[in-house]
Each structure stands twice: as C-alpha cells, then as structure tokens.
Image (spheres, rainbow, N blue to C red):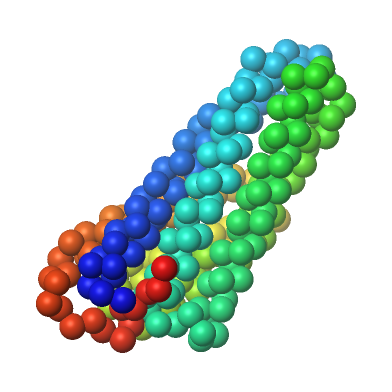
C-alpha cells in the first residue's frame, strides 16, 4: 500500500470514529423514552406523531453503531494486533454490540410500523423489547477494554487514549453490576456520553495523524491497513 493510500485509510477510519458516535447520540435524542405510567391509549397518542422520528432515529442508531465498530476494527488493524488474542476480543465485542444495536433497531422499526397501522399491542410489545435490548447493551463486553489494551502496544494513537479508554470501559462494566442492585441509569448515561466523546476525539486524532504523514515517510510495521 502506498503512503497516499495509507493516509486515505487513516482519514476514512478517523471520520468513522467522528461521525459514528455523533449519529448514535443524535439517535437517542430523536427517540426519547415515553413518560412513565401511560395507559395504552395514552401511549399510542404519544407515539403516533413520533413514528417518523422513530424510523429516522432507528436508522441513525444502526449506522452510528456500524461506523464505531468499523473505527475500532481499523485501529486494531493499524496496530498489527488483528490476529492476537486481544484483537480477537475487540472483534468479538464489536460484533456483539453491532448485533444488539441492529436488534434494537428492528424493534424500533416494528414499533413505528405498528403505530402507523394502529396495532397498539405490537407497539407495546416492541417498546418493551426496546427497553430489554438497552439492558443487553451493558451486558455485552465493553468495546473500549480490549481496544484500550490494543492501543497500549501501538503508536497509532497517543498513550492517553489507551489509558482513558480502559478507564471508561471498566466503568461501564462496573455499572453492569451496580445496575442489578440499584438505579444507576443517570450514571450509565453519563459514562456513555463520555465514551462517545472518546471515540470522537480518537477519530479526530487518527484523521489528523494521516495529514502529518509525509509522502516519503517509511511505513511502520504496525501502520499497515489494507482496504
């Protein structure tokens, strides 16, 4: 791969890291949870004007999750750890998160279609399954733990990204246990926002690193990524 191709690979991967979390956070803002305690008829009245936004938010969530996973796998590839144990764990975590996200998106689509057709029962069931999928997100392995371990052994990103990624990932895993014994959703939401900011910053750093690579630079063994 030529240096120009390598620069484009880094730039595109960095853009995935920036755009993905922005779309994901925006999708959650578009699809807020309904007020608690609504009767079925009241819930239907609340959701009916939001059916289009549910479709949009669901699509943005799926695409955002996909871009984040692509960015994480690009970092693993750039580090040269794709075939190692920690690299495989990153693939596993990324694949699990993407599958859970797409399942949740499917429930959003089902809920939107049920609302449009006036099927209150299906809408209520889909809403319950959406909330269940949100819990599964925290059960899934944190992507930042294996990714942080990968970054500790590479020069792809600055070392603070590795340490901060490990801390954020560990916090999310601890909150999985805390959620069993108490209501910690505000803390979970806060850590998820910090995690999104981490991905945006890491994506920006990777994209900027491509601009700093001179055409005559000698490629490092850990800097190769094949498109």
In the image: residue 14, left or right of residue 135: left
Residue 167, x across and y down, in percent = 43, 66
In the image: residue 180, left or right of residue 91: right
From this view, report whether residue 104 is shown above or below residue 112. Answer: below
Q: Is residue 2 visible?
A: yes
From this view, report whether residue 186 is shown above or below residue 199. Answer: above
Q: Nearer the viewer, residue 167 or 220?
A: 220
Residue 111, x across and y down, in percent = 74, 30
Residue at (35%, 53%) from the top-left corner?
Answer: 15
In the image: residue 137, left or right of residue 64: right
Q: Nearer the viewer, residue 188 or 48?
A: 48
Quadrant of the drawing holding the N terminus = bottom left
Query: Which residue is the extreme one toward the front?
Result: 2
Quadrant of the drawing holding the C terminus = bottom left
From this view, report whether residue 110 is shown above or below residue 95. Answer: above
From this view, report whether residue 161 is shown above or below residue 64. Answer: below
Residue 62, x across and y down, in percent = 58, 46
Residue at (61%, 71%) from the top-left corner?
Answer: 92
Query: Which residue is the extreme one toward the right?
Result: 121
Q: Nearer the viewer, residue 167 or 104?
A: 104
How many numbered markers are drawn?
Answer: 0
Residue at (47%, 36%) from the top-left corner?
Answer: 26
Residue at (17%, 70%) from the top-left corner?
Answer: 213
Residue 140, x across and y down, in percent = 64, 62
């Amino acid at each position: 791969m030529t240096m120009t191709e390598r620069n484009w690979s880094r730039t595109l991967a960095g853009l995935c890291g920036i755009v993905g979390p922005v779309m994901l956070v925006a999708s959650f803002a578009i699809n807020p949870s309904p007020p608690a305690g609504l009767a079925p008829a009241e819930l239907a009245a609340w959701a009916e004007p939001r059916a289009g936004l549910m479709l949009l938010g669901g699509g943005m969530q799926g695409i955002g999750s996909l871009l984040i996973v692509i960015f994480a796998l690009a970092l693993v590839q750039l580090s040269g750890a794709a075939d190692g144990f920690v690299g495989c764990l990153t693939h596993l975590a990324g694949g699990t998160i993407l599958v859970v996200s797409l399942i949740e998106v499917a429930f959003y689509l089902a809920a939107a279609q049920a609302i449009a057709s006036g099927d209150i029962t299906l809408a209520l069931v889909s809403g319950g399954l959406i909330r269940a999928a949100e819990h599964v997100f925290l059960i899934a392995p944190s992507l930042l733990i294996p990714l942080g371990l990968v970054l500790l052994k590479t020069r792809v990103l600055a070392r603070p990204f590795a340490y901060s990624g490990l801390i954020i990932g560990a916090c999310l895993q601890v909150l999985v246990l805390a959620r069993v014994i108490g209501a910690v959703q505000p803390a979970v939401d806060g850590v998820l926002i910090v995690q999104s900011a981490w991905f945006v910053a890491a994506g920006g750093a990777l994209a900027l690193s491509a601009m700093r690579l001179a055409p005559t630079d000698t490629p490092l063994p850990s800097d190769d990524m094949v498109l």
